[in-house]
Image (tube, rainbow, N blue to C red):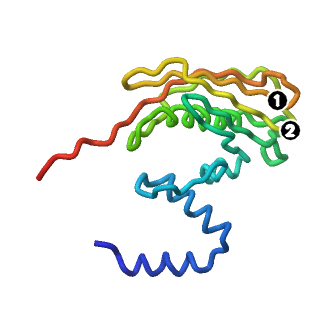
Amino acid sequence: MPDEALRQRLDQAIERLDDAQRKRLLDWAGSISVNVQNARSAGASIGPLADYLHIANGGVVDGRATYYLDVTPELLNPHGVLHGGAIYVMVDYSMGGATMSVLPPGEICATIEIKISYLAGVRGGRLTCATDIIKRGKNVVFLESRVMADSGALVAAATGSFAIIRPPARTAL
């Protein structure tokens, strides 16, 4: 049974948002519940962490994903170089996106591990992460990502594995 007081507070909060904020709220609702259908459009927000790190989805299809990261001053370490954690997060999103592109409705994925090698420092511009599934097993997907700078330089290379999580079987009462 729904909590009417909670519903009323949520409705009041939504009324105070502008259209862009409502769209972002809908995007985030889609990320926390598979029951929110068609919440995201192509290129829409992929979540608050990605928004903060300036990571965008460039497209996912048939086990391939492309994600972008715009390098901004707040992402630089004390030496003026992009923090490796931002690159790692982009790779994680890209691998998750590639995995989700081959799963049937209702199945999700979770990171098991990612091994990343940083090959060059970055001080600005836009990075592109291209990810491909290299093997899909029954319960685990294995992936490979390459992160490139605007100049074409290879910035990082990564491999990872993601678990396939199926919805629990429903039992009749």
Q: Assess disc 1: are there few (<14), some (14-19) or many (≥20) residues with their C-alpha within 10 Å of its C-alpha.
A: some
User: Residue visible at 86% across and 38% down?
Assistant: 125
Give me the C-alpha separation between circle 1 and circle 2.
Answer: 7 Å
Label number found at residue 149: 1
Q: Total of numbered circles in the picture? A: 2
> Mark 2 falls on what kind of element?
loop
Residue 83, position as x, y percentages in the image:
75, 36
User: Residue visible at 41% across and 32% down?
Assistant: 164
Q: Is residue 140 above or below residue 45?
A: above
Quadrant position of residue 97: top right
Residue 62, position as x, y percentages in the image:
55, 30
The quarter of the image holding the N terminus is: bottom left
Judge left or right: residue 29 versus residue 75. left
Residue 105, position as x, y percentages in the image:
41, 42
Judge left or right: residue 172 versus residue 29. left
Which residue lies most toward the top here?
135
Q: Is residue 170 above or below residue 3?
A: above
Label number found at residue 125: 2
> Mark 1 falls on what kind of element?
loop
Task: Report the amino acid beneath label 2.
Answer: Gly
Q: Are marks 1 and 2 in contact (CB under 8 Å)?
A: yes
Task: Report the amino acid beneath label 1.
Answer: Ala
Judge left or right: residue 56 versus residue 40. right
User: Residue visible at 35% across and 75% down?
Assistant: 3
Residue 109, position as x, y percentages in the image:
45, 36
Quadrant position of residue 78: top right
User: Residue visible at 85% across and 31% down?
Assistant: 150
Q: Is residue 25 above or below residue 48?
A: below
Quadrant position of residue 94: top right
Label number found at residue 2: none
Q: Assess disc 2: are there few (<14), some (14-19) or many (≥20) residues with their C-alpha within 10 Å of its C-alpha.
A: few
